[in-house]
Image (cartoon, rainbow, N blue to C red):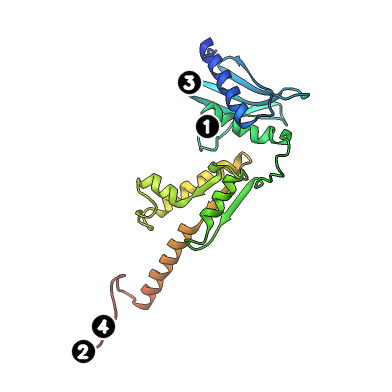
Amino acid sequence: MPKNPPESMQQHLRQRLNRHARERWPYVDAITVRFRAGFAYVEAELLGERAIPLCRLRFTGVLHTWGFALYLESTDSYRDSILPNGLPAGSPEEALDCAGYLYLKAFAPGIDGLIRVPAGLVVLVGPPASGKTSFVRALIAGRQIDKDAVVSSDEIRAELFDTSPAEADPEAADALIFEERDRRIAARLAIGHSAVADLTTQLRIQHNAGIRDTNKRANPGKGPASRNLPPH
């Protein structure tokens, strides 16, 4: 049977989750953690409400990384799940927020008429410099979406190729970039979160590809740099 982490680590996890809850979920009275067979069972206590099961964390031997299983109210059980980072393990704070969005949002008091973007996929389409980034920043500043909800092909390009979006080759490994983008979107949607996708880069690449295809049809058998020469 798997062993529980040392008592000092158990206490550290409790303190860490409660500290994060006070900042992110201030209407939660306390986060309780019970340890059994190497698992940490996390619940939220709210005033006048029964304890609400949230998730189960699996001790991996590393203080800052825990396996994640989401509580399923329909079956009163836990299922291994993927966090918004696209991995089955992450920080305790990531796990608390992931489960909290599902089970704690309904108990949140209204704050200044705040309306959050509902869970689902939001696609931003438009030419460069049309205000998409400013629009997203305004939503983040207004706490209507989370920063992690934004999935940008340009940012993924910078991460994969260690270059800024302006410096990156707009046609380099586009299939890999779009695959990673779709993976991140699917991971958020799978756990009921919103995802905001900026498709400008994809549209630009498709547009450039259309230009190349048009040139090829206009100049069959010739490369992209070929041109029609006047007859001798």
Name the mark on residue 232.
2
Mark 2 and mark 4: span between their CA atoms?
A: 9 Å
Q: Position of residue 211 (x, y in %)?
A: 41, 70
Q: Which residue is mark 3?
A: 63
**Circle 2: residue type:** His
Residue kind at label 3, given as amino acid type: Leu
Q: What kind of element bears circle 2?
A: loop
Give the SS element for disc 3. Answer: loop
Amino acid, disc 1: Pro
Mark 2 and mark 1 lie on one chain; the one further toward the N terminus is 1
Could you tell me how far apart the alpha carbons at marks 3 and 4 are, in whole angstroms?
69 Å
State the residue lying farthest toward the right. 48
Residue 83: image x %, image y %? 55, 35
Near mark 3 (Cα within 10 A), the count class, few <14, some 14-19 or many ≥20, is some
- Residue 107 got which mark? none
In depth, the one of 129 and 73 nearer the eye is: 129
Please report whichever mark, 1 or 3, sits nearer to the chain's N-terminal start.
3
Residue bearing the label numbered 4: 229
Residue 4 appears left or right of 119: left
Q: Are marks 2 and 1 in contact (CB under 8 Å)?
A: no
Of the two numbered discs 3 and 4 on the same chain, state the one appearing first in sequence: 3
Does residue 199 sit above or below 37 in this rendering? below
- Distance (Cα) linking label 1 and label 3: 16 Å
Residue highlighted by disc 1? 88
Residue found 56% across the figure and 54% down from its top: 135
Where, by quadrant of the figure, is residue 145 drawn? top right
Q: Position of residue 30 (x, y in %)?
A: 66, 21
Disc 3 versus disc 2: nearer the observer: 3
Labels 1 and 3 touching (C-beta < 8 A)? no
Nearer the N terminus, badge 3 or badge 2? Answer: 3
